[in-house]
Amino acid sequence: MPGKKIVVIGAGFGGAAAARTARGLLSRDHQVTLIDRSRQAYLCGSFPLLIVGERQSARISRSLGTLTRRGVRLLEAEVTAVDTASRTVTTPAGTEEYDYLVLAPGAVYDWDAVPGAKSAYSFYNIETARRLRRKLSTFVKGRVVIAVASLPYKCPPAPFETAMVLDWAFTRRGVRRDVELHVFTPEPMPLAVAGPQAGAKLVGDLQSRGIRTHTSLAVKEVSRDGRQALFSDGSTLDADLVITVPTHRPSPLAQAAGLVGPSGWVDVKPDTLETRVSGVYAIGDVNNVPMANGRGIPKAGVFASAEGETVARNIAAAINGAAPTAFPGAGYCFILYGGDQAGAIRGEFLARERPSVNLEAPSASGYQAKEQFEEDWRRFRI
């Protein structure tokens, strides 16, 4: 049997996991190609620590070149088109043919969806995180607003853990009493996927730290000087620092390929993560994996990695004539409570009747687990 060509687009959690897993399961007769515009990747889950000076960029980055030593063919290029009819992927370097395609381009940030958001700050990519870090290094007094633009967004705990990390950092610097912290979410409660008890517990944790939580409110506009936020109920709030979680959209690549479905994302089969096109899979932030409650599974790195491994195993099974495996839907997200404690949301997100999810209390051992997670990610174990 002639060798097969597996092409993976995007080298985030999911894409990297798919490429390394497929390479480990297939003989060298088969080619595994990973395409990404950059050789350097950053762990966005550690950006809350980066912005307060508790992490350096080098510690939360990894070079994709490491995967070439494992036999993965790495192509550093921008994918400009996907043609599922001809089974080809186009880049400035040429055209790549594929037998199996794994789409993992992630979500893109629509900064223009909230007018004025570019005047504010964020921490959702390395550039905005570094800019916010510079701002926070000299911030000693005033009102800070952290506001979510829309749902869904990557790493559901991010705005809440960032507020608690800021509380911790300002306390250590001795200026906490001079800083007012607010966090806004469009959801009726923080982390609605974890259920009302977990949501109430998190609200209590925030309030005990003097962090004011505003639910069912999305940021809709930021003033030109970046010092006032307008919300979905028409209210406004002046601030000395506005930090937004930007509107997320599916990759234009998926849109152009005609793979975006009614959910607004690439709809996939929950067990195999295959799209409506045979042999084409979508994993990570670009997809929609429906849970029993009708929501999509959270957009988080752990899920993307598990999806990548599942898809790679099923591609290898198809090639090797073995039985496929189903995506388990179990996972977790860490929640930082500062620079020394972390909790987690953990459970069965694809449970039959409803997601079975718990909020684990913060602890020093939880923080150590997060540190180990960082190390495992850097070494491509996750």
Image (cartoon, helix red, strand yellow):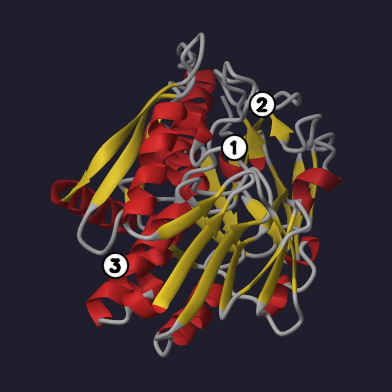
Q: Number of numbered discs present?
A: 3
| Type of amino acid under label 2 | Val
| Mark found first going from the N terminus, 2 or 1 | 1
The percent position of residue 44, horizontal first and vertical second, equals 45, 60
Check disc 3 and report the residue beneath it: 168
Mark 2 in CB contact with mark 1 (< 8 angstroms): no
Q: Are marks 1 and 3 in contact (CB under 8 Å)?
A: no
* Depth order, front residue of 319/43: 43
Can residue 43 be seen from the camera position used here?
A: no
Residue farthest to the bottom, as pictured: 138
- Please state, as top left, top right, bottom left or bottom right, where the C terminus lies in the image: top left
Neighbour tally class for label 3: few under 14, some 14-19, many 20 plus, Cα within 10 Å: some
For the residues marked 2 and 1, what is the alpha-carbon distance in whole angstroms?
27 Å
> In x, y percent, where is residue 371?
23, 56
Looking at the image, is mark 1 or mark 3 earlier in the sequence?
3
Q: Is residue 248 above or below residue 236?
A: above
Q: Residues within 10 Å of mark 2 (few under 14, many from 20)?
A: many
Looking at the image, tell me whether mark 3 or mark 2 is earlier in sequence order: 3
Tell me the element at label 1. loop
Q: Mark 3–mark 2 contact, CB under 8 Å?
A: no
- Residue extending farthest to the left is 365
Res 268 label? 2
Q: Where is mark 1, residue-wise? A: 188
Give the image quarter of residue 296. Answer: top right
Three-letter code for the amino acid on which mark 3 is drawn: Trp
Q: CA distance from mark 1 to mark 3?
A: 26 Å
Question: x and y percent of residue 293 in the render?
Answer: 59, 19
**Residue 334 percent coordinates (x, y):** 34, 46
